[in-house]
Amino acid sequence: MDFLQPTDWAEALAVRADRPEAVPVTGGTDVMVELNLARRRPTALLDLGRVGGLADWGTDGDLLRIGAAVPYRRIVTEVAGRAPGLAMAARTVGSAQIRNRGTVGGNLGSASPAGDTFPPLLAADAVVELGSVRGVRRVPVAEFCTGPKRSVLAPDELIAAVLVPPAAGPERFAKVGTRNAMVIAVCAFALALRPGTRRVGTGIGSAAPTPVRAPAAEELLAAELPWATRAPLPESLTRRFGELVAAAASPIDDVRGTAAYRRHALGVLARRMVDRAWTAYRNGGAE
């Protein structure tokens, strides 16, 4: 097995174009497990850990730009004020050691429907930046996954960054599992309220072949939330929201849970998240 170590982005893209079969590695928290369990035997690994800029975050116009190699720990400690939903999800990823190594870029690259970062990125209308020797393109997170463990990444492309609109209101994330972290989610849900534009974003994980949104649920809340008065929410609204979120999923039975349980749990998570997000807004959350 060849171990390829480019030191800058241009070199990394050139190596990727020349050796498209090489498996990219940033933190290695997914790839190394597969290697240790003999689930994968690539002819080469493309180590991106020395590529300058990939572990940086900053702004790109009005967007928050998070490099593909920024670890979860830094998202929790440095980015939470700008992307609270993503930070909430990052706190639930693995152990402290995994959060020190694992990255959003790696989570996206795995394209798992159970990836913890997908729901908050979906709810926030985030965009993935992909690079190759042919140029740069940006793909909405909602269009990135094409199936379980499959994505729109071309053989010569690498994930450069994810671009996230800064939170314009309360954001929430929760998942169901045997414990809070160090677990693959049975299902997960994220919610973003944008009072200034009276819009709502959602994200569902581990309950369909790909991470998905709940458009009907978003439209319901956007139309029915008492944005101006910040009045308490009627139970009928939160219940209907939960039903629409559950209906947007297409789960299966597997070793972690049944399809019926996943739908039920998503409905419960959705009701809880909208109650918590609305309470934060009523208590002085962002306009």
Image: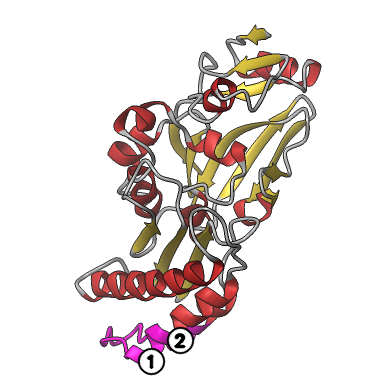
Bounds of the magenta segment: 220-239
Where is residue 76 drawn, in percent x and y?
A: 31, 40
Where is residue 95 drawn, in percent x and y?
A: 33, 34
Where is residue 240 drawn, in percent x and y?
A: 45, 86
Disc 2: which residue: 240
Q: Which mark is residue 236?
A: 1
Q: Amino acid at mark 1?
A: Ser
Disc 2 from disc 1: Cα separation: 6 Å
| Residue 196 visible in rendering | no
Q: Is residue 173 magenta?
A: no
Q: Residue at x 37, y 59 (%)?
A: 174
Q: Secondary structure at mark 2?
A: helix
Looking at the rendering, in which quadrant would you find the C terminus?
bottom left
Q: Is residue 238 magenta?
A: yes
Looking at the rendering, in which quadrant would you find the N terminus?
top right
Q: Are marks 2 and 1 in contact (CB under 8 Å)?
A: yes
Classify 91 as above or below 96: below
Left or right of 111 in this view: 172: left
What sort of colour scheme is used for the picture? secondary structure
Spot the residue most to the left.
283
From the viewer's side, name the closer residue of 104 and 1: 1
From the viewer's side, name the closer residue of 185 and 220: 185
Q: Residue at x 37, y 76 (%)?
A: 271
Left or right of 198 in this view: 285: left
Q: Residue at x 62, y 23 (%)?
A: 38
Q: Amino acid at mark 2?
A: Arg
